[in-house]
Image: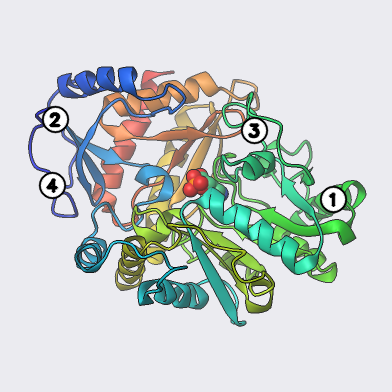
Amino acid sequence: MTEIAGTRTGGPALPQERRLVTEVPGPRSRELLARRAEHVAAGVGTVLPVFVEAAGGGVILDVDGNSLIDLASGIAVTGVGNAAPEVVDRVIEQVQAFTHTCFMVAPYDGYVEVCERLAELTPGTHAKKSALFNSGAEAVENAVKIARSATGRMAVGVFDHAYHGRTNLTMAMTAKNMPYKHRFGPFAGEVYRAPTSYPFREPAPISGAEAAGRAIDVLDKQAGASNLAAVVIEPILGEGGFVVPEDGFLPRLREWTEANGIVMIADEIQTGFCRTGDWFACDHEGVVPDLVTTAKGMAGGLPLAAVTGRAEIMDAVHVGGLGGTYGGNPVACAAALGAIEAMRTHDLCGAARRLGEVMRERLAAVRKAHTCVGDIRGRGAMTAVEIVGTDGHTPEPVRAGSISSYCHSQGVVTLTCGTYGNVLRFLPPLVMSTELLHDAFDVVAAAFDATA
Ligand SMILES: Cc1ncc(COP(=O)(O)O)c(C=O)c1O
C-alpha cells in the first residue's frame, strides 16, 4: 500500500478548514492516479483528481494533507457528514454482531426498523410498506416491477432531462445519451417520455398546471392512460440540472395519475432525506405519491436503497418476486438508522434551508458581475447555477467546466450536471457551518472572475 500522510480518522473532529499544502493534485495523488489509470477501467470517470485519506463534517482530507471543502457530498449522499458519529457507532456495533445473513434467508430487526422509519418519514399518512435494495437504479427498477404487477399494465411514463440510473431499464428511462446510454442499447421497451416543466428554458411562460397538461397530453396520446402502469418523476431534476418545476406541475400530475389508476412514483433518490429543506421534495407542495424511491442520503454513505409506498400496491407482488442477496444488508441498515437519528437530532432539514439561503445570496452577488449566470435555482441545499453565453440562453458547458476545475485547484469540490453540461451544482453536507460555506463561495466567486 502507498504510504499516506496524516490520519485515517475522519468525522466532524477533522479541522473544518480549507488548507492547501501542495498543488492539487499533489504528488501522492498523482502517483495513485497513475496506478488508477493502469488498473481501473477507463469508463469509470472521476471528477476530482485527488485521492481521499479521511473526510468529515464539510471537508475532505487528501493523501497529500490538503483539506478541501466538500460541495458534493459524494453526489448528495453524505448529508449527515462523512463518518458521522451516529453512523459510525451503529455500524461498528452491527459489524461486530454479524455482517450478513441475507434478509431472505434469516431476517433481522434493522431491516424492519428502516422500513418503519420510511413509513413515518415519506409523504402521506396511509399504510405503507417498503422493500430494501442496494442502489438507486435497483430501487427504480423494482418500483416499476411493483407498479406493473399491481396494475397489470406495462407502459411507463418518464420525463425529458430525467436521470434514473445505469441499469438497462433505468437507462431507457434516463433522457441523456452521453455518457449514460451511448452504445449501450438496445434498451427496455414500453418507456414513453413527456416534456417537463423547465421554467428557464420555456420559450414562453407556462404555468405548472399547463406544463403538466402538456405532459399528460403526450403520455395519453403515445402510451394511453389506461396502458400506463406508472409515471416516474424526480420532483426536482437531479443529474438533469436541478430544475425545479413550476408550482402546480406535480399536483396536477398527481391528480391525473390518481384519476387514471396510474401508480405515481416519485424518484426522491437525490432529493430525499432533508436535502431540499423538507424530508422529501414532494412535501413542499403536499404531493403524496403512491411509491417513493430513496437511496443516497438515507444511509450516510453505505449502499442502501428502498421502495416505499401504499401497502396494497407493495403487497401486489407474489412472494419471492422482490429481493436480492444484499438488499437491506444489516450494516447498511444500521448506518441508515444512525443517519436518520442524526437528521432528526440536528434538524438537518432546517440546516439545509439555511445553507440554501447562503448559497443563493452568494450566487445572486456573482450574477451582478457575470452575465453568464443565466439561472440560479434549486431548493434548500440542492442549489445550482446555469451558465450561458452572452445571449442569456445558449448553454456554455466549457465555461461551467472551467469554473469547476478552478474550484478544485483551490480546494473546493464542485460538480457539474445538466442535459447540456452547463450547470454547476452545489450539494454541501448538511452539517457544514455557514463560515465554511462562505469560504467555499469566496472561491466559487473567484472562479467566475478567473475564468471570465
Ligand atoms: C434521481 C436519481 N435516480 C436514480 C439514481 C441512480 O442511483 P444509483 O447511482 O444509486 O443507482 C440517481 C443517481 O444519481 C438519481 O439522482
Position of residue 274 measured from the top left corner of the image (x, y, whole percent):
44, 62
Instruction: Tell me the SS state at disc 2.
Output: loop
Of callouts 3 and 1, which one flags the residue occurring earlier in the amino acid sequence? 3
The residue under the point 35% across, 42% down is 71
Looking at numbered disc 2 in the image, what kind of residue is underneath it? Answer: Met
Q: CA distance from mark 4 to mark 1?
A: 52 Å
Mark 2 vs ligand 1: CB below 8 Å: no
Say the numbered circle drawn on residue 237.
none
Looking at numbered disc 3 in the image, what kind of residue is underneath it? Answer: Lys
Residue contact between numbered discs 2 and 4, judged by CB atoms under 8 Å: no
Looking at numbered disc 4 in the image, what kind of residue is underneath it? Answer: Pro
Crowdedness near tag 2: few (<14), some (14–19) or many (≥20) residues, C-alpha within 10 Å: few
Question: 374 or 151, which is in the foreground?
Answer: 151
Residue contact between numbered discs 4 and 1, judged by CB atoms under 8 Å: no
Say the numbered circle drawn on residue 1.
2
Q: Which residue is mark 3?
A: 176
Residue contact between numbered discs 2 and 1, judged by CB atoms under 8 Å: no
The residue under the point 22% across, 69% down is 97
Quadrant for residue 228, please give it.
bottom right
In this view, the mark in front (2 or 4) = 2
Looking at the figure, which quarter contains the C terminus?
A: top left
Position of residue 390 measured from the top left corner of the image (x, y, whole percent):
60, 20
Q: Which residue is mark 1?
A: 219
Q: Which residue is mark 4?
A: 15
